[in-house]
Image (cartoon, grey):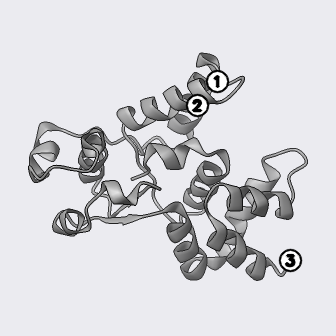
Amino acid sequence: MAGSDVLYSHVVRDYLLHAADQESVNVSWSQSILDEVTEHLMANTRGFTRESANALLRALAETFPDAMAEPSEADYARIPDTPLPDEDDRHVIAAALAADAAIICTANTKHFPAGMMRQLGLTVMTADELFTQLILTHMLEMVAAHRAAVAAFTHATDATTMDALQRAGAPRTADLMTRVLGIS
């Protein structure tokens, strides 16, 4: 289950989606997560309009038609009544349960108490942790995902993509992929 913060960062989102294209990982999200992403992108990204948001949502739906996981009341009922550090994240847990996800990928790991997540059969990982694990376990697919991420942008290079990953909070991913590719 991708948290909205993971889908917010362009380079992190692309890395995740290209990894899913390579079948290294399955992706899922809910409409609430997508609404958060587009709301924040429109508020914080110059030039990102409602039309841009609609185009992103269409592309996600067309490329990953099975990714939408809408939680039911039963999914919410499975979540213990224990207060969360941020109650607004309860919908992310419910969506992960609806998707039968094993991992919630988010930078806000402290918002998801480890004990509760274990009880629900969920692991919470940052994008950096997830990508590093994927590179180690699905190296060829992740190299292909990296190549696709670089090719998707005019003037992007391995080096600029590694810099972008560093800035986006995925330094171990950038370092590991740099070593895997044999670049400096």
For marks 2 and 1, give the CA distance.
9 Å
Q: Residue at x 52, y 76 (%)?
A: 133
Helix, strand or loop for disc 1: helix
Q: Nearer the viewer, mark 2 or mark 3?
A: 2
For this orientation, the residue located farthest to the top is 50
Residue density around tag 2, few if under 14, some if 14–19, many if 20 or more, within 10 Å: many
**Residue identifier under label 3:** 183
Instruction: Please say if the residues under marks 2 and 3 sit with CB atoms less than 8 Å apart.
Output: no
**Residue identifier under label 1:** 52
**In this picture, is 68 found above or below 118?**
above
User: Relative to residue 176, is residue 19 drawn left or right?
Assistant: left
Q: Quadrant of the C terminus?
A: bottom right
Q: Amino acid at mark 3?
A: Ile
Q: Amino acid at mark 1?
A: Ser
Residue 13 x %, y %: 59, 49
Instruction: Please say if the residues under marks 2 and 1 sit with CB atoms less than 8 Å apart.
Output: yes
For marks 2 and 3, give the CA distance.
32 Å
Helix, strand or loop for disc 2: helix
**In this picture, is 93 found above or below 50?**
below
Residue 155 x %, y %: 91, 48
Q: Earlier in the sequence, mark 2 or mark 3?
A: 2
Image quadrant in which you'd find residue 150: bottom right
Comparing 21 with 86, the one in front is 86
